[in-house]
Image: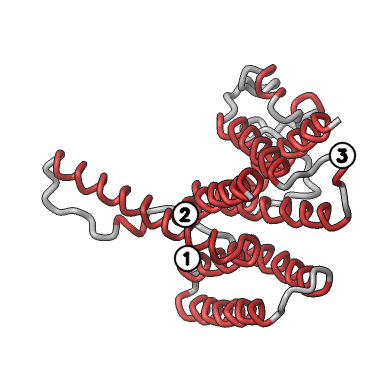
Amino acid sequence: MDILIYILIFIMGTVFGSFFTLAVYRIPKKQDITHTHSYCPKCKHKLGFLDLIPVFSYIFLLGKCRHCKEKIRPRYFILEILSGLTFLIIGYLMNITVYNLKPILLAEGTFMALYLCFVFIMSGIDAENRKIEKSISMYGILISIAYIIYLCVIEKNIIYRYIIYLIFYVIILILDTVTLKKYAKNSYVNSIILTVLTMVIFTGEYIMINTIIMTSLVVAINLLLHKIANIRKKVRKEKKDYGKNINYGFILGITNILNLIFVLSYYKFFI
């Protein structure tokens, strides 16, 4: 029976992944993501049910639009697969089984799904635009507040440590508002800090510390490889602002999920 649960979790993950691809494409364009029917970006033809089956539609259509034959970017297929696998792995590590479907576990699973929505959409948009949309940051804050209420009311966790995070939320939001008014643009740094706060509330300090360490290592390796490439190309004047082009939100998202999976695996198999 458990295998049926995990198949359903994987399918649910691919459905979420399909939504993530839509959100990553539309949110930066300020388009509706809930009421507007899915359509082909090239020919604008509304997609039918057979065009919207996660994973399988891409395979059966050979990666092309049924109507205009325009190639569909592989990222849609990859994101749906990765989302399905992530949901499956985390569901398994959280020990979600037919005989363990308790209200608390279901609540934890629901919050985890909401959190994964935040990480996937934030990472996807940042990977393509090097920008963390304010609407996604606000979504992260709202689910964080809901999760804090759940932890303190239902699981009786101490509220003081979460009050500190909420204070930081307020401070960064005020700074971001000031930056927006003064320079007429959102601050990428402020958005990264808000992202880190959301991550630490959902995954804890230990995972977040490891996430920051891994992110720093990836960035350092990226900068080193860029420097080596410039030396080989005999580039005399290296751009000093190369670090400003690195997608920190995308890297944070990947390393955070990897650390989350590692810690859950440790607790499941070694404790």
Q: Amino acid at mark 2?
A: Arg
Along the polypeptide, which appears first: circle 3 or circle 1?
3
Secondary structure beneath dot 2 equals loop
Which one is nearer the viewer's eye here, 58 or 141? Answer: 141
Which one is nearer the viewer's eye here, 261 or 169? Answer: 261
The residue located at (71%, 40%) in the rendering is: 92
Gap between marks 2 and 1 measured at Cα:
8 Å
The residue located at (54%, 77%) in the rendering is: 172
Secondary structure beneath dot 1 equals helix
Determine contact: label 3, label 1, CB under 8 Å. Answer: no
The residue located at (57%, 24%) in the rendering is: 71
Q: Which mark is residue 98?
A: 3
Which one is nearer the viewer's eye here, 170 or 96? Answer: 96
Determine contact: label 2, label 1, CB under 8 Å. Answer: yes
Q: Amino acid at mark 3?
A: Val
Q: Please state the horizontal and vertical placement of residue 33, each as a whole percent of the image.
A: 73, 49
Q: Nearer the viewer, mark 2 or mark 3?
A: 3
